[in-house]
Amino acid sequence: MTRLASNRTTKEPDLTATFRRKLIRWFATHRRDLPWRRYVSPYSVWISEIMLQQTVVKTVIPFFERWLGRFPDIAAIASADEREVLTLWEGLGYYGRARNILRSARLIVQQHGGRLPDSYNTLRELPGIGECTAAAIMSLAFGKSYPVVDANARRVVSRILALRGLDRPLEEQVKTFLGQAMPPRKAGQFNEAIMELGQTVCLSRGPLCESCPLKTLCFAFRKNLQDQIPSKTASSTIQKRSILLLLISDGRIMARRKESGIFAGLWLLPTIPDNGRTKTAISTFIGRDFKAEISPLPALELRTHHYTRYAHRLKPIVYDVTGKGVRPADGWRWLRLAEIYSYPFPSAYRRILDELRVAQR
Ligand code: ADE
């Protein structure tokens, strides 16, 4: 359950008005110059908001600029080739987002005359647009009063009101507060200001309370509770351990295009459980009649990739495989190493392929 650590309520008369005034004034002087803020169109807002899902601003900047350079409008993306889209997205992760942009762009062209809909409910029907993104588009692109309740807004408001809790009632309280505080004609600015404050001042660890424009209003700060609010989620990281097989044969590497799941449309390399039975496992990819030579490539070290819900420890090993009947098992293909850049790979694999290329020079 959500509870207030104070007797403060969202109905307190001056609180929302003071919050709004201080926040907007602060944003006027602290607003970062970000590429999606220079020229604002519904299309650029949509693309930036999708890229900013689960990804920090600094990472998004070069991807956003490259994307707008290559696909300047909805028509350009609607007629794009999936492989090119995924290659451009390489390094941003969560590739479902790129596939959803492509699907949405095609739907927008077919059903909405090529223009991004300016209705919250219609936006929500497009693939990849959830509550937060729809609210951001409605406010930033169309000036409509929809509060964005993302992790930043939740953290800022939870601290201001000293709210504890993680669940749905907390979400509703935050939304109600933001709805009351939101200025009717500056909805977009207000939403961006909260996200900006959450990203640069009201940090989840080590908030910079002394420089916060809202510190006099903040109940968590007054009670020195900013490190306990918001409550932390229990970490449930699952560890997976695999060997990544870089099977090389005559200037080619074995890979497979994934057809479904989070990596659909991307190319993957073979992985096997890290349990010591490597040779048997290799034979499932290329048949039994092979000679494998392990290439000593010290650059390829053990590494752990962290995803939202699990960590994946990968041990890349390069095998030079030759033999009479060496041919890929169903679904697997030999890709020429010289052409590997025209195939989209998850960025964890791409980094390994880069190292492989350097090591093989
Ligand atoms: N995170 C999500 N949307 C954002 C925006 N418009 N500006 C900065 N950070 C964001």
Image (spheres, rainbow, N blue to C red):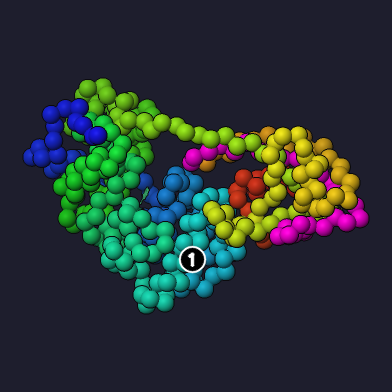
**Left or right: where 103 falls relative to 155:** right
**Left or right: where 146 falls relative to 342:** left
User: From this viewpoint, is residue 47 visible?
Assistant: yes
Residue 263: give x, y in percent of width and height. Answer: 57, 54
Residue projecting furthest to the left: 13
Residue 151: give x, y in percent of width and height. Answer: 34, 42
Residue at 42% x, 75% y is: 109
Residue 294: give x, y in percent of width and height. Answer: 83, 40
Residue at 46% x, 46% y is: 55
- Res. 215 image quadrant: top left
Up-down relation of residue 222 to residue 137 (above or below):
above
The residue at which mark 1 appears reads as: 102
Residue at 31% x, 66% y is: 122
**103 or 65, nearer to the observer:** 103
Up-down relation of residue 52 to residue 330 (above or below):
above
Report the span colored magenta: 308-337
Amino acid type of disc 1? Answer: Leu
Whether residue 333 is in magenta: the answer is yes
In the rendered image, the quadrant that contains the N terminus is: top left
For disc 1, the neighbor class at 10 Å (few under 14, some 14 to 19, many from 20) is many
Residue 123: give x, y in percent of width and height. Answer: 33, 64
Residue projecting furthest to the top: 224
Identify the secondary structure beneath mark 1. Answer: helix
